[in-house]
């Protein structure tokens, strides 16, 4: 973290971001941070002019969460470097570990399996958080207590497949004729250690096995397209995030992970330890936002972006205002019970 005077209240220019992002192979998606006034978050004198990098991945929920952090930090007086929209989990993690970023929302299960190399999943959210917190501490990263919201993976069926197949659990896929086991996936899930191949093994449908799932039965799409293709019937089962607003909008049915393959994926704030030691007041500024998040809130916020086409930054701002963290004359009330 670097300290220097603020030159603008809300917008971090693309010029400031291009060099460091290019140097580490990252690209920012949209560095617009809406202006806002204090609410329960007020200016903090010790944060005035302190440069803080906010990271976030490139899918909708992460864009919204990163914008929340950027907005409250800006209101608190920090110079925000908005690095939201980083493509891929590993690249976002690299940004935090390298010091290009100082804080981001991350999911406990993702850290446990993808960054920390563990193989045994922990379904209890608190136990999963504590295990990640303790194992990641030597890496110079501090995990604050987790948010109530959990965004786990699941398979969902479109309306036609739901009616025709009549199943409700993932284990029931193995009871279907092999030709019915067709899947729509996004690239990262195809290769993750908590992703497609290990999941099929856990459910006794090995990939490439004649009695399991053939490669020809797997379609790879951009994450947004997975939802529409599943609804359209291009596959019987699509990979989804359980807090995605398109699940209800497209009338998708989520299957239960009845063998508990996925660990707990509660969102939590991860802060560089050296940043937190220099500015422990960040906990007071940021943690209340994390504690106010719920599954219901994120489903609605994701829906506003993915279904209604609203800007993630404005959706984040409006929710912060609805929760009283900030105020702004232009805000549109968000009807979310969190």
Image: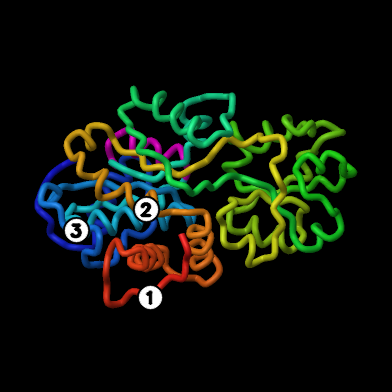
Range of magenta residues: 88-101
Q: Is residue 4 left or right of residue 59?
A: left
The numbered dot on residue 42 is 3
Tell us which disc is closer to us: 1 or 3. 3
Label 3: which secondary element? loop
Mark 2 or mark 3, which is nearer the start of the sequence? 3
Could you tell me residue 226's position as x and y percent? Answer: 65, 55
Q: Quadrant of residue 140?
A: top left
In this rendering, the answer to whether 138 lies above or below 62 is above
Q: Residues within 10 Å of mark 1 (few under 14, many from 20)?
A: some
The numbered dot on residue 2 is none
Instruction: Return the residue nearer the eye: 313 or 265.
Output: 265
Q: Is residue 278 left or right of residue 152?
A: left
Could you tell me residue 44's position as x and y percent? Answer: 15, 52
The numbered dot on residue 332 is 1
Q: Residues within 10 Å of mark 3 (few under 14, many from 20)?
A: some
Q: Residue at x 31, y 41 (%)?
A: 23
Tell us which disc is closer to us: 1 or 2. 1
**Image coloring type:** rainbow
Dominant secondary-structure state across the stretch colored magenta: helix
Q: Residue at x 23, y 45 (%)?
A: 282
Mark 3 or mark 1, which is nearer the start of the sequence? 3
Question: Marks 1 and 2, how far apart in space?
Answer: 19 Å
Mark 2 or mark 1, which is nearer the start of the sequence? 2
Tell us which disc is closer to us: 3 or 2. 3
Label 2: which secondary element? helix
Q: Which residue is mark 2?
A: 66
Q: Quadrant of residue 6?
A: bottom left
In this rendering, the answer to whether 241 lies above or below 34 is above
């Amino acid at each position: 973290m670097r300290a220097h005077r603020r030159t603008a209240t809300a917008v971090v220019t693309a010029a400031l971001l291009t060099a460091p992002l290019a140097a580490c192979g990252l690209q920012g998606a949209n560095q617009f941070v809406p202006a806002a006034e204090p609410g329960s978050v007020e200016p903090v004198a010790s944060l005035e002019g302190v440069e803080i990098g906010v990271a976030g991945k490139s899918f909708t929920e992460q864009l919204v969460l990163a914008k929340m952090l950027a907005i409250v930090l800006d209101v608190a007086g920090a110079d925000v470097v908005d690095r939201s929209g980083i493509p891929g989990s590993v690249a976002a993690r690299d940004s935090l570990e390298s010091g290009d970023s100082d804080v981001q929302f991350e999911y406990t299960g993702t850290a446990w399996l993808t960054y920390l190399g563990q193989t045994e999943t922990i379904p209890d959210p608190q136990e999963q958080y504590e295990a990640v917190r303790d194992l990641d501490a030597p890496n110079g990263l501090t995990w604050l207590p987790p948010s109530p919201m959990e965004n786990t993976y699941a398979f969902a069926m479109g309306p036609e497949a739901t009616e025709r197949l009549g199943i409700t659990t993932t284990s029931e896929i193995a009871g279907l004729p092999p030709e019915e086991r067709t899947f729509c996936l996004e690239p990262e899930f195809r290769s993750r250690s908590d992703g497609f191949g290990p999941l099929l093994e856990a459910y006794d449908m090995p990939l490439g096995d004649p009695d399991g799932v053939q490669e020809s039965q797997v379609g790879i799409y951009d994450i947004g397209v997975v939802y529409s293709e599943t609804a359209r019937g291009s596959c019987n089962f699509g990979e989804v995030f359980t807090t995605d607003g398109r699940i209800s909008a497209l009338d998708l049915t989520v299957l239960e992970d009845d063998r508990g393959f996925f660990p707990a994926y509660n969102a939590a704030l991860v802060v560089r330890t050296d940043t937190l030691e220099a500015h422990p007041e960040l906990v007071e500024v940021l943690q209340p936002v994390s504690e106010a998040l719920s599954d219901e809130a994120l489903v609605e916020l994701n829906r506003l972006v993915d279904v209604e086409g609203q800007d993630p930054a404005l959706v984040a701002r409006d929710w912060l205002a609805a929760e009283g963290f900030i105020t702004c004359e232009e805000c549109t009330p968000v009807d979310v019970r969190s």
